[in-house]
Structures are given as structure tokens and as C-alpha cells.
């Protein structure tokens, strides 16, 4: 049962007692690990300093794939989302409700309580999802072939993004503008039983820091399969990479929300480079890959940059294409020293460690960057940058 009021009182009380005991047992298994990780993260964060602002726009933090009470599987009111965004520093939210024609006019759009809401829809197709971002009308549920879904999304002014990519019955042809390269819901599903109880305790506490510690200790994984799928798509053409929060706030039992938005919004976020904080700019950033995925549970990644330089002049950023040039280099700027891995065409090309690294480029290819932050002796995934596509010298990068 899910809090419908039909559970007999004694059974509900027994279930609550059992869940409380399990949470207490889980909490007792890792107090030292939690305390030690907290202390090391505080030490690391104290040395953080934001890199100089990017010439390509302001780093504006947002979350992608969020549901409201307009979805059949979410009771989350707007007030909760606005408050969660305010407490975690989120400035834009891509809503992806499971829509029906009668809910279209009720969709949040524009600035509400200081937070920009971009409407959208999650369409379940082939066992996974296609998100339509910025759509003005719903996609008919009778559509089951992606070309038709794509056409419906684009004709309503939206941007198609593949979600839950490891759930596809088979990887579809790349007709979307991007994919989810990190799926927060999948990581939570993968937590072991004891870890799951500890995570529920931290997540449901309403304290973003407690949620972050639980996530880092028991949940976070590399999700290599998603990145391998992304590399295969990147070999075919431009493909934006975003993080999916998949927030529902639907587990509401015994007077408590076990998956509140405030506990999720601080974990993994999309840092978009925007000149103006509005719907069109967010849609363009998501579509082009003008953003990085920041695992901010460990430390805020605001200001992190992966850019191409011509001499000492920044010439391109993630999501851009640039012709090969003798003066071309790739540079990584970070708020904290970290372990950096630059990949070319899906394979490790260069590695290093520090706040600022620069690498001369001598070949065309798709260059992307992964960054790990070492805390408590463990290298934890911290930043995923969208790629810079280096074209042969004669190629025109286009608009």
C-alpha cells in the first residue's frame, strides 16, 4: 500500500516500527564513515575557488527530468519544487510530466518563485523514455515509432532527448538532440538493501547535506554503460549529454516523504552556460550540450570549464565544433584540484591532476572530459563535460 489509508492501523504501526528499526540499524553501521567523509569534504571545500567566468555565458545550475502532481506517478506540488530549488541553488527546472491533453494548460512555464520552469513531457517508448523539452502540446500515446514521436516533439516547438538509455529494448538510431548520460534513479535502484535504508534516512531527512553524504557513501556509481552508449552516439554526430534527476517525491508513507526533491536537487545537476536565464536559452544549452554535469554532492562544480583555445583566446566550449589549427589546445579549469581524464573518440587521450590543465591538440576527433574528486582516498565522479568536436582543417564548423 502507498499511504491510501486502507492499511489496518496495527499493520501500519508494525510496518512503521520495522522501517524505523531498519533505518536505525543502517544509521548505526556507518557513523564513522559518514563523519570521516564529512570532515574530508569540508577540508576540500574550504580550498575551493571558482575559475574566472567563462566568455561563453554564466554558469546557471538546473535539474532535468522532474515530475509534478500533473503526472499520474507524482503528487509533488509546485511549492515543494520551488522551495527545494531555493534551498539547493537550482535556478531552472525541466519538467517532464507524463502529460494528458487536459493537463496542458496547467503546466508550469516561466519564472515561479524565482525559479525558471521549462515545460516538457516524458514519453515511454521501447521500454525507455523520450523527453520532449519545451513542448507546447502533448505527444499522442498512440505513437510508438520514434520518427513520429520526434516529429510530434519538434512540431510543438520542443527538443527530443533520450532518457533511461540503458532501458531501451535496443539502442535506437540517433534522432534525438541528446541523451541522459547519468541516471540518478538507476543509481538509487542499484543500492544494496542495507545501503538503501541508510540512503532513505539521509534522503528523507530534508537536509541536503545528509542526503549528499548518504548518496556518496552508498549510491554513486560510474554508470559506464551510459557513457559507452554516449560515445557510440558521438561517433555518429553531435549528441548533448545531460543528467537525469527523475524526481517524483511520490513515496509518502507514515507522514514522511522518503524521496523529497530537496534531497535530490543537490546531488547531480546540469550547469548550463547561459547569456540569459530564459526558456529559449535553457533549451538551446540542453540541445547543444552547452553544459556540464556536476556531481555537486561532493563539492560545488560551478565555474568548471572545458574549452578550446587558439593561442590564449578561448575559441569553443563544450557542445561546439572547431577546425583543427596549429595553435589549438584544450583546457580544463576546476574549482578544486582533481583527477582529469580527456578522451578522444571514446578512448583515453590524456590524463592529469590539478585545477588547471592544458593539452595541445594535433588531430581531429571528438574530445570530452571526465573529472574525479578524491575524498577519503576514493576517486569519486565529479564532473562530466560535453565534448568539443575538432574538425579536419578544411571543415566548416557551421553556425
Image: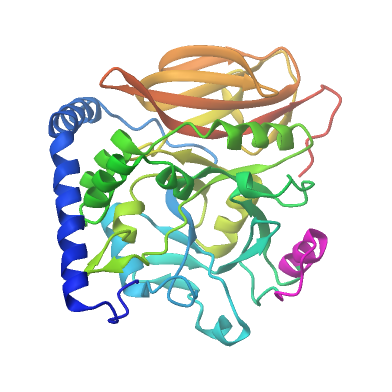
Q: Nearer the viewer, residue 376 or 329?
A: 376
Seen in the picture, residue 75 relative to 162 is either above or below; the reply is below
Give the residue at x 20% y 25%.
Answer: 40
* Position of residue 232 in the picture relative to residue 351 (left or right): right
How many marks do you count on the picture? 0
Q: Is residue 115 above or below residue 395?
A: below
Which residue is found at the position 53% from the left and 15% from the top? Answer: 358
Q: Is residue 140 visible?
A: yes
Vertical order, 389 against 247 (above or below): above
Residue 288 at x, y percent in the picture: 65, 46
Relative to residue 299, is residue 107 depicted above or below?
below
Report x, y in % for residue 334: 40, 27
Q: In terms of secondary structure, what is the magenta stretch mainly?
A: helix
Q: Quadrant of the C terminus?
A: top right
Instruction: Indicate whether residue 257 is drawn in magenta.
Output: no
Report the residue that reaches farthest toward the right: 394
Residue 121 location (% of width, % of height): 59, 68
Range of the magenta residues? Answer: 140-154
The quarter holding residue 31 reads top left
For the residue pair 11 and 108, the one nearer the viewer reads as: 11
Could you say which is closer to the camera, residue 20 or residue 340?
20
- In the rendered image, is residue 208 in sight? no
Q: Nearer the viewer, residue 9 or 186?
A: 9
Residue 363 horizontal/vertical position (percent): 74, 15
Is residue 141 in the magenta section?
A: yes
Q: The N terminus appears in which quarter of the rendering?
A: bottom left
Amino acid at each position: 500500500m502507498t499511504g491510501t489509508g486502507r492499511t489496518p492501523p496495527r499493520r501500519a504501526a508494525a510496518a512503521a516500527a520495522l522501517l524505523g528499526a531498519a533505518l536505525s540499524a543502517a544509521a548505526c553501521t556507518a557513523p564513522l564513515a559518514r563523519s570521516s567523509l564529512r570532515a574530508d569534504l569540508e577540508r576540500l571545500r574550504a580550498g575551493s575557488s571558482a575559475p574566472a567566468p567563462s566568455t561563453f555565458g554564466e554558469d546557471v545550475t538546473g535539474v532535468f527530468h522532474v515530475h509534478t502532481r500533473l503526472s499520474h506517478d507524482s503528487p509533488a506540488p509546485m511549492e515543494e519544487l520551488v522551495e527545494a530549488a531555493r534551498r539547493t541553488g537550482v535556478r531552472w527546472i525541466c519538467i517532464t510530466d507524463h502529460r494528458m491533453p487536459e493537463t496542458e494548460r496547467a503546466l508550469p512555464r516561466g519564472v515561479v518563485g524565482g525559479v525558471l520552469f521549462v515545460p516538457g513531457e516524458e514519453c515511454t517508448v521501447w521500454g525507455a523514455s523520450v523527453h520532449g523539452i519545451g513542448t507546447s502540446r502533448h505527444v499522442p500515446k498512440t505513437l510508438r515509432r520514434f520518427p513520429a514521436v520526434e516529429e510530434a516533439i519538434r512540431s510543438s516547438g520542443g527538443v527530443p532527448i533520450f532518457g533511461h538509455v540503458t532501458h531501451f529494448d535496443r539502442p535506437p538510431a540517433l534522432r534525438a538532440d541528446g541523451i541522459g548520460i547519468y541516471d540518478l534513479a538507476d543509481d538509487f535502484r542499484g543500492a544494496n538493501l542495507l545501503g538503501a535504508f541508510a540512503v532513505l534516512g539521509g534522503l528523507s531527512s530534508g537536509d541536503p547535506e545528509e542526503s549528499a553524504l548518504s548518496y556518496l557513501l552508498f549510491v554513486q556509481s560510474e554508470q559506464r554503460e551510459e557513457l559507452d552508449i554516449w560515445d557510440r552516439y558521438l561517433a555518429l554526430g553531435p549528441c548533448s549529454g545531460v543528467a537525469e534527476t527523475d524526481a517524483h517525491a511520490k513515496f509518502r508513507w507514515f507522514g514522511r516523504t522518503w524521496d523529497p526533491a530537496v534531497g535530490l536537487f543537490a546531488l547531480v545537476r546540469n550547469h548550463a552556460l547561459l547569456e540569459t536565464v530564459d526558456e529559449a536559452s535553457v533549451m538551446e544549452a540542453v540541445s547543444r550540450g552547452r553544459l556540464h554535469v556536476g556531481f555537486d554532492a561532493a563539492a560545488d562544480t560551478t565555474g568548471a570549464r572545458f574549452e578550446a583555445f587558439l593561442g590564449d583566446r578561448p575559441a569553443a566550449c563544450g557542445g561546439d565544433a572547431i577546425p583543427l589549427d596549429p595553435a589549438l589546445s584544450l583546457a580544463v579549469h576546476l574549482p578544486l584540484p582533481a583527477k582529469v581524464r580527456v578522451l578522444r573518440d571514446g578512448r583515453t587521450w590524456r590524463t592529469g591532476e590539478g585545477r588547471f590543465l592544458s593539452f595541445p591538440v594535433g588531430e581531429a576527433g571528438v574530445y570530452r572530459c571526465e573529472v574525479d574528486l578524491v575524498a577519503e582516498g576514493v576517486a569519486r565522479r565529479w564532473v562530466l563535460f560535453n565534448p568539443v568536436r575538432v574538425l579536419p582543417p578544411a571543415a566548416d564548423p557551421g553556425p
